Image (tube, rainbow, N blue to C red):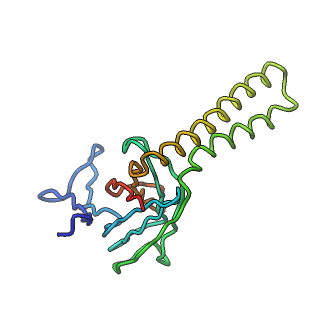
Amino acid sequence: MNPNTLAAVVISTPGPAVNNDGASCPNTILPVTFGSIDASLKNNTLRVDFVSESETNNDHFDMEVSVDGKRFTKIGEVKTATKDGHSSETIAYTFTGDVTSMGGVAAGVGVLLMGLGMGCSRRRRIGLMILALVGIGYGIISCNKNVSTLAVAATDIYVRIAQVDKDGTRSYSKVIKAVNN
């Protein structure tokens, strides 16, 4: 078996399972069977190549990164290549994104809050300004931290793929470390 392959897990019992309200539950198969997953980092650009071996009720994949392998941040999305979210065929996907933009979202929220504060009472405007400054500060610190972290040890970028069903249910691939090119 390929060590980069995740197989679907079948949760089964010796007959139909029964949930807490007494209703019968059929055997369950995970919505996506992941094949190989490879990630590389070059000049702060992350490239993730991955394969789905089958898809059931799939809407899209969220690409998530982490510098510690525990706390992940979404940096992009890849729509399913299937027409209706179902496929028993192998499908190859590629994602490319800039990992230094992870803190940019917080800064953007801070600027938005500053704009929303116009026309409010003084007390509310002060509260929104404080939140805005915190958001902007976090965004700046995040960007600087990511840039310096990547410059010093780019091999410490971890990647996982969140598979998202049409109903919003999420399942995750294994966590892999990006290779520095």
Work out which residue is located at the far right of the displayed protein and give it.
119
Q: Where is residue 102 in the image (x, y as percent from the top left)?
A: 56, 47
Question: In what quadrant of the picture does the C terminus appear?
Answer: bottom left
Q: Position of residue 118 (x, y in %)?
A: 85, 32
Left or right: 5, with 128 as reference point: left
Query: Residue at position x 81%, y 37% from top?
Result: 115
The one nearer the camera, 84 or 104, is: 104
Query: Residue at position x 75%, y 27% from top?
Result: 129
Work out which residue is located at the far bottom of the displayed protein and give it.
89
Q: Where is residue 161 in the image (x, y as percent from the top left)?
A: 41, 58
Question: Against 14, is 106 above or below?
Answer: above
Work out which residue is located at the far top of the displayed protein and give it.
123
Question: In what quadrant of the picture does the N terminus appear?
Answer: bottom left
Work out which residue is located at the far left of the displayed protein and give it.
14
Question: Against 134, is 179 above or below?
Answer: below
Q: Position of residue 139 (x, y in %)?
A: 62, 39
Query: Residue at position x 28%, y 51% from top?
Result: 23
